[in-house]
Amino acid sequence: MTNFISVQLKKASEVDLAKPLCKFIQQSYPGGEAQAEHCRAAEELSKLRKSALGRPLDKHESALETLLRYYDQLCSIEPKFPFSENQVCVTFTWKDAFDKGSLFGGSAKLALASLGYEKTCVLFNCGALASQIAAEQNLDNDEGLKAAAKHYQFASGAFQHIKDTVLSALNREPTVDISPDTAGTLSLIMLAQAQEVFFLKATRDKMKDAIIAKLANQAADYYGDAYKQCQYKDTLPKEVFPVLAAKHCIMQANAEYHQSILAKQQKKFGEEIGRLQHAADLVKTVASRYDEYINVKDLVDKINRALTAAKKDNDFIYHDRVPDLKDLESIGKASLVKSTPVVVPLSQKFTDLFEKMVPLQVQQSVSVYNQRKADLVNRSIAQMREATNLANGVLASLNLPAAIEDVSGDTVPQSILNKSKSVIEQGGVQTIDQLIKDLPELLQRNKEILDESLRLLDEEESTDSDLRTKFKERWQRTPSSDLYKPLRIEGANYHNVLNKAVQADGQVKERYQSHRDTIALLCKPESELNAAIPSANPAKTLQGSEVVNVLRTLLANLDEVKKEREQLENDLKSVNFDMTSKFLTALAQDGAINEEAISVTELDRLYGSYTQKVQESLKKQEELLKDIQNAHQDFSKMKQSNNESNLREEVLKNLAVANDNFVELLSNLKEGTKFYNELTEILLKFQNKCSDIVFARKTERDELLKDLQQSIAREPSAPSIPLPTYQTTTAGGSKPAASSTPTPAPRTMVGTKPQPPARPPPPVISAASSPSSASAPSGTSAAPSAVPAPAPGASAPAASTAPSQAQGPPYPTYPGYPGYCQMPMPMGYNPYMYGQYNLPYAPSPVYPNPGQAPYPPPQQPGYPFPQQPYYPQQ
């Protein structure tokens, strides 16, 4: 009697998880032991998938344990890897568990680049395998009963979880087996079977009949609800529906039987008989309708014996009135089962392979924090560098410190010599020229990488658009134009970055050209440099004056401020703090990360003192420059002025400015070179990302095209198959009169297998061919025989009626139609000739040997329709 329903496993296509995961790890994590460990974990995960899905699984706890461990691993990596079509793109392909396939195509399947889809399908297999393990248990002992109940409740919980989450996990229509309706029905079936197991245990333990009756009544209720959910659907295997209907009746009969025992104990003999009669009717229904699925002979005998004995006692002793069925009190219900909720980890042996890898949410938070940190540091450094450039510009415009060093008026000031020496040591104009020459090559390299990346997207998107136009609503996948939007935005950002870089390069080149000659002058030896600087009258009278001493002190203080800034800049760059632990703690405590609040607090703690020092340095420089300008005014009044000194001072100013520009240009060009090299690495990653998603889309496209081809092949060529008139034969085998108009028959119909006609002699040129022989009715095979050409002088008999065999759709008969009457038909048959028989077909200019056309293909034996003629496709 105990016939339990188990669920078939879904089949998955092979997928290499290691390669895309390792690629993401190598792109996202610095090299070293940690990266290598993460890659080894990715390889272990790929092996685990093969163990769980790549082979048939035994109906054993160990096989279920493997599936559970793989499901737990999927849950653990979900927050750590960005599985999507445009990031870590892995396409998972699964077949429908209940689809048996067809003659022209394989089983229905779905391929998605979604980890949620993989999780759903793996959980389905967990529930399915649990149902199979439960069905294999020995229910004659307590251990088997407990194991069966546990696995059925787990399976029910797994299917219920799929019902609740599948639509959000897939974001598209799932296959039938994992649809919410089917998963909900399977969950209820498993719950009903778990309740039945508890009923069997209560019966085996000889518990009170009132309790057993309530357990059975609850099981009947579960089975009835499951049957109602799926009786009008054809998604589940056909044997499920009769089993559910039978189980509903059986459990209701058991409930009535045990309630009748309770009624007998309470001396309600009429009620006892009424319940036993109802139970007998229920099991009689099962025996008559569902006997091939469930054997209820023992239960029928037990109920009938009890009913016979109860009637006998009542007739001879009690004479109690038997109430109507509707008057009987309802039997209570007692549910001892519930769906086991899916709480990760499901496996007790689970070990997270990626335990040391931080979740993706933490990675993103760390990335945003690093960006905030970089902005703060860059802003502070930019403020200090801008202030230093301003100070250098002010000093150059005042010809300081050269003005107070120019004692003799005919030698190079020491500050200028120091600047010249520094420029020469750094390569001078040759270094600048080489760096400027390299920039276009670096720029072109980056442009080519970006253009190639976008070309890949354009090419695949164009193909997808063409196929969508061709197949219309059949082409059910995310449009490439929608999928590539993030990549398009990213590519546009890179274009903007390159355009800005080109503008910056132009500004650097323009600035260099305006100062190149002066920088070249700084690179000359001291003698040539001195000769290039005009001489002036000596200004020894100013040496030792109070104004000069004040200027020297102020300039020394300003130099000290500049040195402090250099140290402060190094300190800002060297501050380092790993925020991972902070974000992990926040995620563990709150389940979410308030990145902005945490980052702002930490940045203020780490950089608050440095930003304060930056502001103090800026304020101090402002005061010093003000004092320097005031002191220089006094110095200028005391200094004897003439044309020669003015010209000399102008040259010295230009040399100081040239030095400042050289330092800044060299820094800009080095940063530009570094920028282009780093951008190349970023663009290569972008290109790999584009290449990966395009490859995945091509694979998905090929799978979808294959499925579409199979689907189109399975479609009928006509909406309905008309019954040919010659099929309606009389008992004696005679045929009714043929209609004057032949009935068109679909080209794809095949009939009984004919014998190929004998090849005829060369025909006499005529305007028509002879008709084919009629097929024998009632499945009798009649091979068509060729009609020989008439003897010389003989005339062909005129036909007064159309052939009785249904004809295919004739070709248009106007001249000039492609292939018009050019395809020779088999000897003895001419579909274009109505009413004329025994005439050979006319020779065709296309086929020099008439009568040699290919024979029709062999037919399926026993197929009820006759062989149809071959029609060439135009």
Image (cartoon, rainbow, N blue to C red):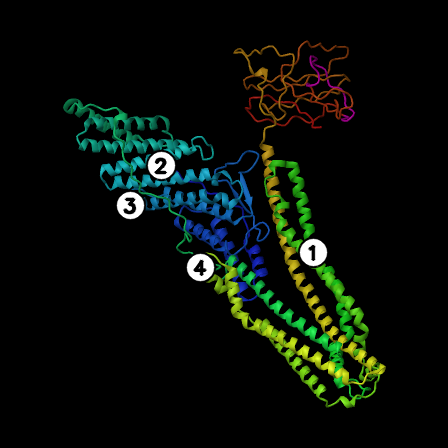
* Residue 379 falls left or right of residue 137: right
Q: Give SS at disc 2.
A: helix
Q: Which residue is mark 4?
A: 588
Q: Which residue is mark 3?
A: 142
Tell us which disc is closer to us: 3 or 2: 2
Q: CA distance from mark 3 to mark 2?
A: 23 Å
Task: Using the rendered image of the protein, determine whether residue 279 is visible from the camera's viewpoint.
Answer: yes
- Amino acid type indicated by mark 3: Asp
Of labels 3 and 4, earlier in sequence is 3
The answer to whether the residues at label 3 and label 2 have Cβ atoms under 8 Å apart is no
SS assignment for the magenta stretch, majority: loop
- Amino acid type indicated by mark 2: Tyr
Q: CA distance from mark 1 to mark 3?
A: 71 Å
Tell us which disc is closer to us: 1 or 2: 1
Residue 117's place in the image compared with 36, above or below, is above
Q: Which residue is mark 2?
A: 222
Q: Which residue is mark 1?
A: 495
Q: Give SS at disc 3.
A: helix
Comparing 309 with 279, the one in front is 279
* Residue 523 falls left or right of residue 379: right
Question: Which residue range is magenta in the image?
Answer: 828-848
Q: Give SS at disc 1.
A: helix
Within the magenta stretch, is there residue 112?
A: no
